[in-house]
Amino acid sequence: MMTGVHVWWYLLSLVSISNITAWFYSARRLTGRKPELLPDIYRARRVLLWLSAIYVLVCAFRSFLPRIDLERICLVESWLSSMLVGRTLATIAELAFILQCAILLREAGRGLQVRTAVGVFWSVVPLVVIAEGFSWYAVITTNYLGSVIEESLWLITGILLVISFIALWPRVTDGQRYFLGAAMAYGIGFVLFMATVDVPMYWTRWLADSAGGVTYLSLQEGIQDAARMCTASFEWSVWREEIPWMTLYFTVTVWVSLLMVHAPVFLNKGQRAP
C-alpha cells in the first residue's frame, strides 16, 4: 500500500538523480570558465567541485536508502542501510561540505582582508570534526545526548559562518553581494532551523529516554548492533520528525554545495577580476 513516506522517498530519489546531473553540468561549466580564472582560483574551484561530488553522491545514496540511526530503522532492509555504513558515508560527506565552506571563507577573508572571516575559517572545521565524534557516540550507544551536542556544535558553526558573512558584507562589490546575500540567507535559515527544530527534537528525545530509564549500549555492543541490518518501516509516525530535516539536507544543502563551486572571486572594491 502506497503511503506518504513512499511518496516522499520517491520524490527525494528523483531530486537526487537531478542533483547528480547538475553536478556534471557544474563540472562542464567550470571547465568553460578556466580561461577567465587565475590558475590558483581555478585550482581552488576544482577542489570545491570534487568536494561537492562527494557530498552530492553521499546525499543521493542516503536519499535512496534513508535510515534513522539511533532507532535502527530504514526503508530498505540491506547491509547498505546499516547504521555503520550510513554514518561512515555521512561523516565523509559532512567533512567535505564544511571543507568547501572553509576554503571559500578563507579565500574571501584573505581577498577582502577581513580578519573575522579568516578567524572563523580556522574554527569551523575543528568544530565539525568534534561534532562528528559526538554523532558517532550517539549512533553507537543510542544515547541522544550525543546528537544534542553534535547538532549544537553545528548550530554554533552556523552562527560563526553568519558572523563572517556579516563581516564580509561591507567589503564586497555589487556582483559579489548577490552570492553573499544568498549565503547569508541560507546561514540564517540554517541557524533558525537548528535552534528551533533540530536541537529541541533531540533534546526532547533524550529527556524522554532519561525519564524512562533507558539503558544505553556499550561501545562493543553498539558497534555490533550498528553493523546489523536495520528494521524497515514505512509508518508515517516513525518518519514524521525525520522528513523535514532530511528533505532540507538532501535538497537545499546539496544545491548550496553545487553553487559554492561557482562563487564569485572575492576582491576588494576597486580591484578587477582577472
Image (tube, rainbow, N blue to C red):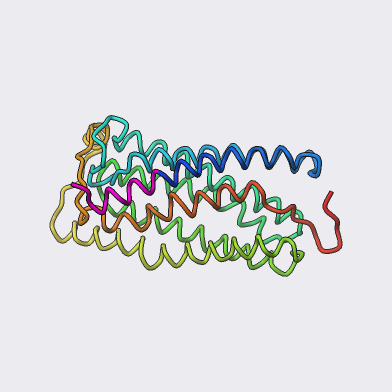
In which quarter of the view is residue 24 placed?
top right
Taking the image as shown, residue 180 lies to the left or right of residue 172, namely left
Q: Position of residue 193 (x, y in %)?
A: 42, 64
Residue drawn 28% across the image and 46% down it: 68
Decide whether residue 8 is among the magenta residues.
yes
Most prominent secondary structure in the magenta stretch? helix
In which quarter of the view is residue 222 placed?
top left
Task: Pick the residue in front: 81 or 154.
Answer: 81
Q: Residue furthest left?
A: 212
From this view, report whether residue 46 is shown above or below residue 254: above
Q: Position of residue 158 (x, y in %)?
A: 51, 60
Decide whether residue 217 is among the magenta residues.
no
Q: Position of residue 220 (x, y in %)?
A: 24, 33
Task: Pick the residue in front: 28 or 51.
Answer: 28
Task: Pick the residue in front: 7 or 210.
Answer: 7
In which quarter of the view is residue 133 placed?
top left
Q: Residue furthest top?
A: 79
Residue drawn 49% across the image and 52% down it: 253
Number of numbered discs present?
0
Taking the image as shown, residue 19 lies to the left or right of residue 105, namely left
Taking the image as shown, residue 98 lies to the left or right of residue 181, namely left
From this view, report whether residue 178 is shown above or below residue 60: below
Taking the image as shown, residue 107 lies to the left or right of residue 139, namely right
Q: Residue furthest front?
A: 1
Write the start and end of the magenta stretch as one range: 1-13
